Image: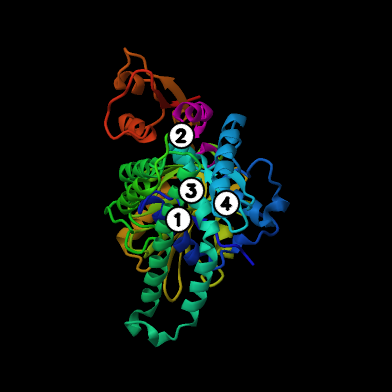
Amino acid sequence: MTLRIMRLWKQGSGDQRYLAFVARLCLMLLVSLSIAACVTGPGRESRPLASIPTGIPEKALSDERASLIYMFGGEYQARDSLRSEIRTIVDRIVAASDDPGQKYRITILNSSSPNAFALPNGELYVTRGLLALANDTSEVAAVIAHEVAHVTASHALKRAELEKLARSLPEGLALNETNNSESLQFLRASFSRAQELEADEIGIKTIAKAGYDPYGAARFLSSMSRLSNFQTLSQTGRRMTFLSSHPATPQRISAALVAARDVPRRDTVEADQNHYLEALEGLTYGEDPSGGVIRDRQFFHPRFDFTFTAPALLKLENTTEALLGLDVNGTTAMHFDVIQSDQSPTASLEKGWIKIVKIEQIEETLINGLSSATGLGTNSDWSFRFAAIRKGSDLYRFIFATRSLTPELDRQFLEAIKSFRSLRAEEHDALQPLHLTMVTASESDTIDKLIAQMRGVNRPLDRFLIVNGLDRPKIKSGMKYKLITAD
């Protein structure tokens, strides 16, 4: 039986859950259509866009834990000081939890998204993106305690029981028979939000009992809120808050402040910033360029040496196996991947990629000097634009799917396909990994002087404020601050 993963510290109610929604819908649309190359055969080998994580042999990917780590970019090779710091926090939280006898294994994932989740068997996962956003030990403790609370409160089991009940309900039991599935979806989402608030409350009591500052949870949630507001969710600005699995971040912050005020006061509480920031020194920040980088509409991949610009209506999500895109209405999607193949682009299209769709109107062409071919296809519900581009021994494949393929929409698809090209030297240079560097502000330092040392990020002032948990551009002499720098 597959254990249910509880993803918990996504960025508030916005960007990251929307991206997960993108991935799910694109995979439902395209993978369920049985893309032929998902099964390798003679002359055809799938090529993951992201690197195979270090230390995980491909044969081990059938193991659930290894597969999960692989899906999140692999295990991050953190410095010993950071691993020790996180292990100490976990041990203190578990000792103060409702089940101090439960054993936990903590894994740091190589993902830039602030995220953490727990499995009922005591597997704890945090991403380097979450660690980069936290600013002291009490904030990390709040995240860990939240996850431990989900385990000790048996939230996964309760959710499984709810799902079983939901599947057993008669079709006419919902308030509105025509919206039965929506009613069940609302029930599940409400249940999830209640669990999140309960885990927050339990977690805050736990960190206070463990000797950490109970206000660390509210501070970290505030940083999440700033990050969510910084990142544009979509061109239309829509936010999927109503049916999201988490309460809106302002609601969680307010509830966290109330819970912190209600816990018994201690003479001393820990919110150790210095030691935590010292442990973060050198932490990789942002996306791992080796697996491809999304910059607005443009996708760069230094390892495979290519870039292209996606249609403006699509929100992009980079996964291990493919780059996915979806519009805000869920009516237009993109699947882009790469395979090793000795077939020509035309022959590949003629053989077909989706079992129930015949590719027709195939046209050979050159795209920025690369041998290519495009084609069209339809089924009862969707229209498709396909493209195959030969670059060395690899075949790059575009699949665009839409409910209604208008001439204007097809023009945008073709424009995206034709934008595929090799990287320029300056683009390669700009895709160097970024890291966190710690500095101690002197009396002569200003925020402008500190920001001037940052490299590789847009809107550096906003980034500085977010990564340092600041709500205004003011620094204090003698305090440590995170800077984002390049190699």
Q: Is residue 42 magenta?
A: no
Tell me the mark number nearer the camera, choosing from 3 and 4: 3
- Badge 1 marks a residue whose secondary structure is helix
Magenta-colored span: 270-291
Q: CA distance from mark 3 to mark 4?
A: 31 Å
Does residue 100 sit above or below 302 in this rendering?
below
For the residue carrying disc 1, how many other residues have a C-alpha within 10 Å: few (<14), some (14-19), or many (20+)? many
The residue carrying mark 4 is 71
**Disc with the residue nearer the chain's start (2 vs 1):** 1
Q: CA distance from mark 3 to mark 2?
A: 13 Å
Is disc 3 in contact with disc 4, using a CB cutoff of under 8 Å? no
- Badge 2 marks a residue whose secondary structure is loop
> Mark 2: which amino acid?
Glu
- Badge 4 marks a residue whose secondary structure is helix
Q: Position of residue 187 (x, y in %)?
A: 39, 71
For the residue carrying disc 2, how many other residues have a C-alpha within 10 Å: few (<14), some (14-19), or many (20+)? some
In the foreground, 394 or 275: 275
Q: Which mark is residue 199?
A: 1
